[in-house]
Image (cartoon, grey):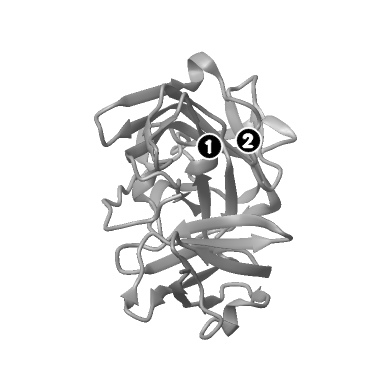
Amino acid sequence: MKYFFVALLVIVAASCENDTTTGPVGTLSLKLTDAPMHYSQFMSASVTIDKIEIGNSTDVNSMMTIMNTPMTYNLLELVNGITSTMANAEIPVGDYNLMRLYISSTEMKMLNGDSFTYNMNQNGYSGGGMMQNGMMLNNQNRSIDIPLNHPLTISNGSMSEFLLDIDVDQSFMLQGVNYDNNNMMMNMSGFTFMPTMRFVDMATSGIISGTVQDAHGNLPNATVSLMQNGTIYTSTHSNSNGHYALIGIPQGAYTIKTELNGYIMNPIGNEQNMGVLNMMSKATLNVDFNMMTSN
């Protein structure tokens, strides 16, 4: 999972197909980000999203389209707090409890020029993934159904913002990987796509950010993992300046750790990181890591 660098932020403004609505409306914004992969041999890992719908699970006729212009996103650019807006739509006031995401294809490009694609319309999704919050693959519609844990209430003039975080490392399942004598990846024969993602309400979520460093300066490419109940909730890598950011973190209790080849966490200077982090609604936590060489 990799998080780096200055990236082009693609802003996609989308509106409802039902723009003839003359009644009161509110605004819904959907943003995309990435929990990246641990291989450094890729220049891109892209998804093409064709359409997004919202409605109510109890009424099949309630689904309305809020984005229907296919857009391709390089997820490796959407890291360390960088997001891209998938949809920014005015929708009628009311309660909504279901969102549908239509991903048609994915592509991976390696630094050596090799390129691989996986088409969901032709091949379907591979397995059920590890989608959080009850998200499910809808084979009938070839969509990803995202139930909203708490119904989204749109009131006149309101603004709601949600974040979709796709875990590239767990979603792009590499096949036929060959390694060199140093266990570094050289090439592969292809991949399948098994969507692994989380979906959060930004109105109640917080941010954890900080710097990974040793006695000589900041450290890039360190893996920072946020754990909940003993499993990884999300993760990132420190960028070229040693900075990292984890966004869209719901209220709750977490633990956090960082890993980097050749380094261990210094027992001095990491006292704040050894215990439980209590994230409050809309809070911002600063957590720095002090590393030392392991030999």
Answer with mark 2 or mark 1, whichever residue precedes in sequence.
2
Residue 141: x, y in percent? 60, 22
Residue 238: x, y in percent? 40, 63
Q: Quadrant of residue 116?
A: top left
Q: Relative to 52, is 280 above or below?
A: below
- Do labels 2 and 1 touch, CB within 8 Å? yes
Task: Give the amino acid at mark 2.
Answer: Gly
Q: Is residue 25 visible?
A: no
Total marks placed: 2
Q: Which residue is mark 2?
A: 129
Q: Residue at 46% of width from left, 74% of height from top?
A: 291
Q: SS of the residue at dot 2? A: loop
Q: Residue at 41% of width from left, 44% of height from top?
A: 39
User: In the image, is 227 to the left or to the right of 44?
Assistant: right
Q: Which residue is mark 1?
A: 171
Give the CA distance from mark 2 to mark 1.
Answer: 7 Å
Q: Is residue 244 visible?
A: yes
Q: SS of the residue at dot 1? A: helix
